[in-house]
Image (tube, rainbow, N blue to C red):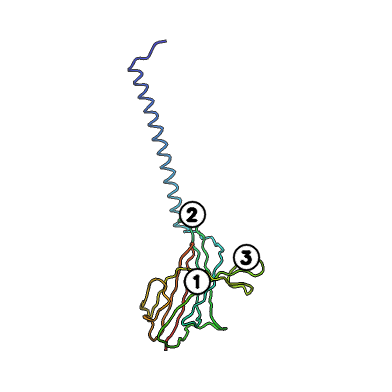
Amino acid sequence: MQKATKKEQHEALKALKDSNRSFKQAKIKRYLLSLFVIICAITLFKVVIGTISIKALFYHNGFSLQINDNPIGITTKQELSRDFIPFLIRYHNVYENKFFPGTNFKDVYEIEKKNTYILKIETYECIYEGDGNKTNCENDKTRQIEILNVKYDLKITKDNEIIYDGIFIEDITPYIKEGKYNLIISNKSNYITTTIKASIIIN
């Protein structure tokens, strides 16, 4: 058997390297082509259909709001929004409710003029008395358990002007004089955004 010369060995090695390089380049091209097709398909899906929302159930809480120990009515909105597949599919649901003293909700609650105004909010989770499991706060047969250390933000507006916007504070005396005010209390935790609104008037 005739032994290959150095030149032939070099040419064979070069051919092998060229073959490997061509194989890798072809593999990269196939990968890039597949990626391009996927991106085009996602883009077309977003343009034609948009994001698919899947309704996800979650237990919404109960709330109470007081000014100078007097309860006032509030409207509440709790919204769950969580991506399942980013930009394509998300879990989403909204619960809206009203909590108020007495039998009738008022759009605006009159507050007696005082030297100080102390705002207090309490948040509850509800337990069904039948089986002791957590449930929504719309069932009469529930037991409320207060949730402590909830970190809220507070916004106070008057005549569409923002008077205060920051962390929740109980003593709102510096921002309340006379007239009509809107109180907006908010929190975001565990993919759930909570918004609580109340309107008061100081005469």
The quarter holding residue 167 reads bottom left
Mark 3 or mark 2: name the one nearer the start of the chain.
Answer: 2
The residue under label 2 is 85
Residue depicted at x 60% and y 66%: 134
Looking at this view, name the residue that lies furthest to the right.
Answer: 130
Contact, mark 1 vs mark 3 (Cβ under 8 Å): no
The residue under label 1 is 77
Mark nearest the camera among 1 and 3 is 3
How many neighbours does mark 3 have within 10 angstroms: few (below 14), some (14-19), or many (20 or more)?
few
**Mark 2 residue element:** strand
Residue depicted at x 43% and y 75%: 184
Q: Is residue 40 above or below residue 151?
A: above
Q: Which residue is nearer to you in this view: 4 or 109?
A: 109
Q: Which residue is nearer to you in this view: 137 or 20?
A: 137
The quarter holding residue 16 reads top left
User: Residue 51: where, in percent of width, then height?
Assistant: 48, 59
User: Residue 41: where, in percent of width, then height?
Assistant: 45, 50
Q: Which residue is nearer to you in this view: 82 or 40?
A: 82
Badge 1 amino acid? Lys
Mark 2 or mark 1: name the one nearer the start of the chain.
Answer: 1
Contact, mark 3 vs mark 2 (Cβ under 8 Å): no
Q: Quadrant of the C terminus?
A: bottom left
Q: Which mark is residue 133?
A: 3
User: Residue 141: where, in percent of width, then height?
Assistant: 64, 73
